[in-house]
Image (cartoon, rainbow, N blue to C red):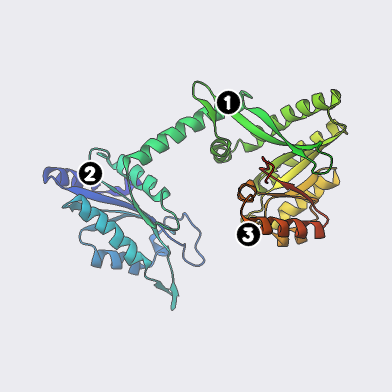
């Protein structure tokens, strides 16, 4: 049952608030699941009564419409002014930020709250719940409570429209490929090409890759998109080799841990490796703290055994560090362009890059620095 159907007396309260020319606050809260409880279970038994009691004792007229293992949905109506609703949202978050007692031990809920007010933008229960959900999705580590703003719905509708168009584009094999060359500092020759997807949304022009790649991952079509782009890149690379511009090359493709663990990914890479012995396929992995590192490394080892290469992207930043190198014998690292762009005229950044290069060389790793575009760099 959807949260909007669980809201019980909300429609009556909305009518009452409307008649009194007042508003209502609808809120959606997510928090850290209780120990030993699986997220998503809608069962009041798994939520200590002290959570409900705390809200009911301190927030007048509060109603909890849905309680889950890691979520609360509720509302307060009527509310006198919009500012009062915003203050109530902050108060609810503060109340839930106090640790609760679980079998004699304190449990920090670490809640996040999205709130929405009954107004012209949200005149129905369904719209209120959607608005509170959109506000919740806008929270982050610096903002644990966010109130709905109309632009959030505009962004949601834009995102939904783009997701619809991208899904159709991938199904119709419309995305294209761009190849970014890597040059040797010694010979000046092109030694590799980085494969990048491009999407020209019909009637709206080019969509930034970071934007549509994220949507493709959400839709579950990332593997299909990568396979289409890799096939185009292989044909383009073969043409370059046939024209005598290069004798051999590596095609680097970015691959997330989730993509590497896709059931068909190893087969896709294996087929690409066997297609043309002059072309090697390289996997550029940006390490992530999520997922099973062992499974990812096992999959990479299997593909390296087939003839693929392996590289660490964004080397020196976040999770792309030397600990990752020790877990698997990569043969290459790629230093992020954000660092190289700051290098000219910045001694500290220059020293950082020199240190990263030295560390990579100690591990016999080939080094690529992205974004070198002028003589100073």
Q: Nearer the viewer, residue 320 or 272?
A: 320
Q: CA distance from mark 2 to mark 3?
A: 61 Å
What is the residue that sits farthest to the top in this orientation?
A: 203
Q: Secondary structure at mark 1?
A: helix
Q: Is residue 241 left or right of residue 149?
A: right
Give me the C-alpha separation between circle 3 and circle 1.
Answer: 44 Å
| Label 3 crowd bin: few (<14), some (14–19), many (20+), radius 10 Å | few
Identify the residue shown where x is 46% and y is 65%: 34
Q: Position of residue 310 (x, y in %)?
A: 77, 48
When asked about the image quadrant of residue 325, the answer is: bottom right
Q: Quadrant of the N terminus?
A: top left
Position of residue 340 in the picture relative to residue 358 (left or right): left
Residue 94 in sight from this viewpoint: yes
What is the number of the mark on residue 11? 2
* Residue, disc 3: 348
**The furthest residue to the left:** 20
- Answer whether labels 3 and 1 touch (C-beta < 8 Å): no
Which one is nearer the viewer's eye here, 289 or 376?
Answer: 376
Describe the element under mark 3 as helix, strand or loop.
helix
Quarter location, residue 30: bottom left
**Which mark is first along the chain, 1 or 3?**
1
Q: Find residue 169 and name its label.
A: 1
Front label number (3 vs 1) = 3
Can you tell which of label 2 and label 3 is closer to the viewer?
3
The 10 Å Cα crowd at callout 2, few under 14, some 14 to 19, many 20 or more, is: few
Viewer can see residue 250: no
Frontmost residue, 92 versus 174:
174
Which residue is pictured at 64% across the width and 51% down the height? 343
Identify which residue is drawn at 78% across, 29% down: 237
Image position, residue 160 (x, y; %)? 46, 34
Q: CA distance from mark 2 to mark 1?
A: 41 Å
Vertical comparison of 108 with 197: above or below: below
């Amino acid at each position: 049952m959807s949260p909007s159907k669980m809201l019980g007396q909300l429609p009556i309260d909305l009518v009452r608030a409307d008649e009194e020319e007042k508003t209502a606050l609808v809120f959606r809260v997510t928090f850290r699941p209780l120990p030993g409880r699986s997220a998503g279970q809608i069962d009041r038994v798994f939520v200590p009564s002290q959570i409900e009691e705390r809200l009911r004792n301190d927030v007048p007229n509060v109603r909890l419409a849905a309680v889950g293992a890691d979520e609360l949905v509720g509302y307060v109506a009527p509310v006198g002014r919009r500012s009062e609703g915003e203050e109530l949202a902050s108060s609810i978050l503060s109340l839930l930020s106090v640790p609760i007692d679980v079998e004699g031990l304190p449990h920090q809920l670490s809640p996040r709250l999205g709130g929405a007010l009954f107004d012209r933008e949200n005149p129905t229960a369904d719209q209120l719940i959607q608005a509170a959900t959109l506000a919740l999705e806008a929270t982050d580590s610096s903002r644990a409570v966010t109130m709905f703003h109309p632009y959030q719905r505009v962004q949601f509708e834009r995102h939904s429209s783009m997701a619809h168009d991208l899904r159709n584009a991938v199904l119709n094999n419309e995305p294209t490929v761009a190849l970014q060359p890597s040059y040797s500092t010694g010979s000046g020759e092109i030694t590799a090409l980085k494969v990048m997807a491009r999407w020209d949304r019909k009637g709206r022009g080019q969509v930034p890759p970071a934007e549509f790649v994220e949507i493709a991952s959400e839709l579950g079509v990332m593997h299909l998109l990568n396979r289409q782009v890799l096939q185009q890149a292989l044909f383009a690379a073969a043409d370059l080799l046939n024209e005598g511009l290069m004798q051999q090359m590596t095609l680097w493709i970015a691959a997330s841990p989730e993509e590497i663990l896709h059931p068909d990914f190893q087969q896709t890479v294996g087929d690409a490796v066997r297609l043309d012995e002059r072309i090697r396929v390289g996997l550029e992995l940006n390490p992530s703290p999520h997922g099973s590192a062992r499974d990812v490394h096992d999959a990479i080892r299997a593909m390296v055994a087939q003839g693929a290469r392996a590289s660490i992207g964004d080397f020196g930043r976040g999770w792309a560090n030397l600990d990752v190198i020790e877990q698997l014998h990569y043969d290459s690292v790629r230093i992020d362009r954000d660092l190289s762009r700051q290098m000219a005229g910045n001694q500290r950044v220059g020293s950082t890059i020199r240190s990263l290069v030295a560390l990579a060389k100690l591990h016999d790793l080939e080094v690529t620095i992205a974004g070198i575009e002028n003589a100073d760099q």
